[in-house]
Image (cartoon, rainbow, N blue to C red):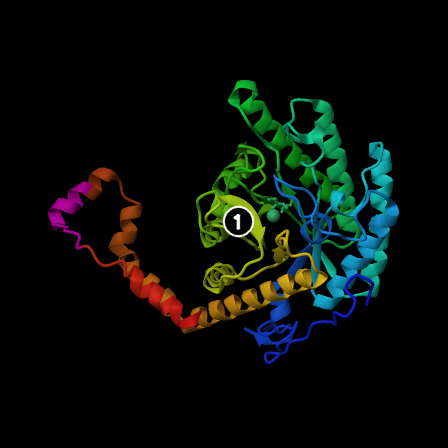
Amino acid sequence: MSRFFKDILPLRHDPESDGLAYRHYDPDELILGKRMEDHLRFAVACWHSFAWEGGDPFGGRTFDRPWFGETMEHARLKADIAFEMFEILAIPFFCFHDADIRPEGASFAESRRNFEEIIDLFAEKMSAGNTRLLWGTANLFTHRRFMAGAATNPDPDVFAWSAATVKLCMDATHKLGGQNYVLWGGREGYETLLNTDLVRERNHAGRFLQMVVDYKYKIGFEGTILVEPKPQEPTKHQHDHDVAAVYGFLRDFGLETEVKINIEQGHAVLAGHSFEHEIALAASLGVFGSIDMNRNDYQSGWDTDQFPNNVPEVALAYYEILKAGGFTTGGTNFDAKIRRQSLDPKDLVAAHAGAMDVCARGFKAAVAMLEDGTLEALRAERYAGWDTPEAQAMLESDLARIANRLESDGVDPQPRSGRQERLENIVNRFV
Ligand code: XUL
Ligand code: CO
């Protein structure tokens, strides 16, 4: 292995290991007729693992990485180390933004050339190994030119820059055989209504997304276009607040059958929802695509992007994913970063290994819950009254006829327990 990962050996499935290993994740274990690796479809997020420097609002870089620096030499070294980690983890996928992997140039054209050179290097490394691209995306939020948004920027030149950047990133994703292309509207929103034309911004965001879909067909990209909702942070109000808001937005612009949703655990929580709520809602609307798996610090109320460590929470998320039929082009992207005091290369590997184990345990619990069937049977029983012809006929009726029937039949609803604690006890049998 390299100078960086030194003596860290490729991880194996070994339930008895007391070192770096997968205790629960076994890629080859067959579950519901499919390998665990093919169910979970794990991905490393290049930004958190290789571009983030360990800064916080009170202090800068804590990590000391040999690839930190704004030259192509640094970028090539970063690519080498990233693919080494993919191999150590034997992880099937990765994800990236343009800005994670190339130095910013003095002009758009120079940034493009830098990016294309690194994409060629990625293509070589991918053909020599087993890691594939889950999704690519564009960073339209870090550079100061994007401070007032990308597609929603009041300056049309920023719209143009953003369109050219997304084109470039879609071309690269297509070239690398990416399975999805993601748009997270990091600054597609506003800080104050006093300087914001809300209607114009929303229309521009919608037109931009239509152009993305058109371009997908133009280049023959067969992956899925995904939007990633988030209610706030960095921008105070974002147009893509949550799954419900994004669905309404997609319908307004005629895109609800073209675009699906990438749901992140921490973003769901910031929006005041549970992760499983967002997944279940997206699935019910036919727009569930993929997940960004992480967790927030529940006390700080901030998007802390920590690695997941809560099996019961993860189990409920995979339960909804399984009920929706599992992933198709989507997967489990660890949009998560180690803490700024976790300095060692080993911390980076252990964080992913632990998260994969947490997900494997949660996933297996979800499968067991589904196979057991008690939860679904009790849910069906709760709504069984609607299975009668009379109840179904009411949905075709009108308020006056319903009111007449209510009195003539002497309808008198009897409240029944929602049994929440008993249902939670059932979940606890499996996690
Ligand atoms: C930010 C976030 C992004 C997107 C990709 O909160 O989740 O990393 O996943 O731009
Ligand atoms: Co994310």
In the image, taking residue 131 as reference, residue 190 lies left or right, namely left
Rendered image quadrant of residue 209? top right
Which span of residues is magenta-colored? 403-414
Residue 139 in view here: yes
* Residue closer to the observer: 314 or 29: 314
Residue at point 58% right, 57% down?
307
113 w.r.t. 157: above or below? below
Q: Quadrant of the C terminus?
A: bottom left
Question: Would residue 302 be found to the left or right of residue 52 on screen?
Answer: left
Residue that sits furthest to the top in the current view? 194
Q: CB at mark 1 closer than 8 A to ligand 1? A: yes
Q: Residue at x 72, y 43 (%)?
A: 217
Q: Mark 1 sits on what residue?
A: 266
Residue 366: x %, y % from top left? 47, 67
Task: Report the image quarter containing ligand 1.
Answer: top right
Q: At 51% across and 59% down in the image, what residue appears? A: 321
The answer to which of 132 and 17 lies nearer the viewer is 17
| Residue 95: image location, x then y, percent | 70, 53
Residue at the bottom extreme, as displayed: 16
Nearer to the camera, 341 or 267 = 341
Q: Amino acid at mark 1?
A: Gly
| Percent x, y of residue 49 | 69, 54
Mark 1, secondary structure of its residue: helix
Residue 284: x and y in percent read 47, 51
